[in-house]
Amino acid sequence: MTTATAHAEFVAQRRAYLGGTDIGALIGVSPWASPLSVYLDKVAPEQAEEKDSLPMRRGLVLERFIADEFMRETGLVCWHPAPIVRTDWGFPAGASIDYLVAYPDHPRTPIGLMDAKTAMSFYGRRQWQAPDPNRGYEEGDLPDAYYTQLAWYLAVTELPRAWGVADTGDDSLIKVPVKPNAQVQAKLIDAGLRFWTDHVLAGIPPEPTGTDSDHDALQRMWPETVPEPPVYIEDPVAEGILSDYLAGKAREEEGRRIAEQAKQRLESIMGENERAVVGGWQLQWKPVTSNRIDSKRLKAELPEVAAQFSKPSTSRRFDVKESS
């Protein structure tokens, strides 16, 4: 079985329970998911978005390498277990752990768990950067989403310790220890129970929170449209939400105008200079040359070529205008 196939099966199994990445979305610390996207994954897996990218594939392949290096650096042993699922909290709670960890003399008696991350991009390295490199790594140095994931795994497994381990491309792995925290675990379990009861079992989607994950989830929930007739919504709640939207757009437009005016004033002060330093900030205003395909001309003069390299893409766009 290929790594990609095994991962696809793992993702399908994980939809039957709340896992470590799910719980981060429910408490608002996940940059990859939202309560609405988690809900959609659980109640309508056929609409789930299959995510695939080079960083994800790289991370899957390098998991084993990170585990081998972790064992070499610590003298511990580790192995990849099947997902652990429990239902005694009132909902299915799971831990899809990268590796269980044990002492060499008792190699199948776990003393903790380890989660492997590949963080070789600039953004990834910044996330794993310790505030004070001289003191080593502590729990607070873990990114919030990863700490929540490990805290969830410790709650599900009841193991006494965990390590968040990252390969940032440096000379050694970053190893951040995490211990169980009863207050954090109780908060996560309560969030999971309320979500499963109020939304998954009740069939009621959570409110969107304004994230890209919510945007994608809404697009997946209603990909087909009914053009006519318009639906008339006589609801004070909807009217209040519309007022919030219009007020937010007005602030956004005003903010853009203020920022553009300030930018133009700075450009006029810089004049012919490409770079400037103002109050500790570095400004840059330099020529940028870009070559863009004239798609209108291409379609007119070489329609067959344009059609051959065109890729249709459909998404729903929201717009508001005054009703006549």
Image (cartoon, grey):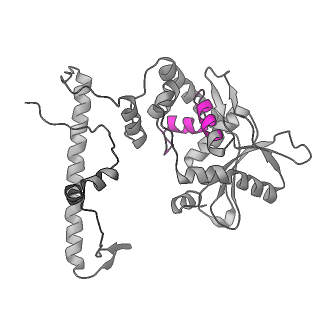
Magenta region, residue range: 6-33
Q: Where's residue 235, x and y in %?
A: 23, 20
Q: Quadrant of residue 305?
A: bottom left
Left or right: 142 in relation to 261: right
Q: In this view, does 258 lie above or below 251?
A: below
Left or right: 174 in relation to 278: right
Viewer-proximal residue among 182 and 69: 69
Viewer-proximal residue among 298 and 26: 298
| The N terminus - image quarter | top right
Confirm whether residue 279 shows in the render: no
Q: Residue at x 51, y 43 (%)?
A: 51
Say whether residue 19 is magenta: yes
Task: Give the residue at the far bottom of this rendering.
Answer: 272
Q: Where's residue 287, x and y in %?
A: 28, 75
Disc tally is 0
Q: In which quarter of the image is residue 260?
A: bottom left
Confirm whether residue 291 shows in the render: yes
Q: Is residue 278 above or below residue 100?
A: below
Q: Residue at x 74, y 52 (%)?
A: 67
Q: In this view, does 272 lie above or below 216?
A: below
Q: Where's residue 55, x and y in %?
A: 55, 53
Viewer-proximal residue among 128 and 320: 320
Q: In which quarter of the image is residue 262?
A: bottom left
Left or right: 174 in relation to 298: right
| The C terminus - image quarter | top left
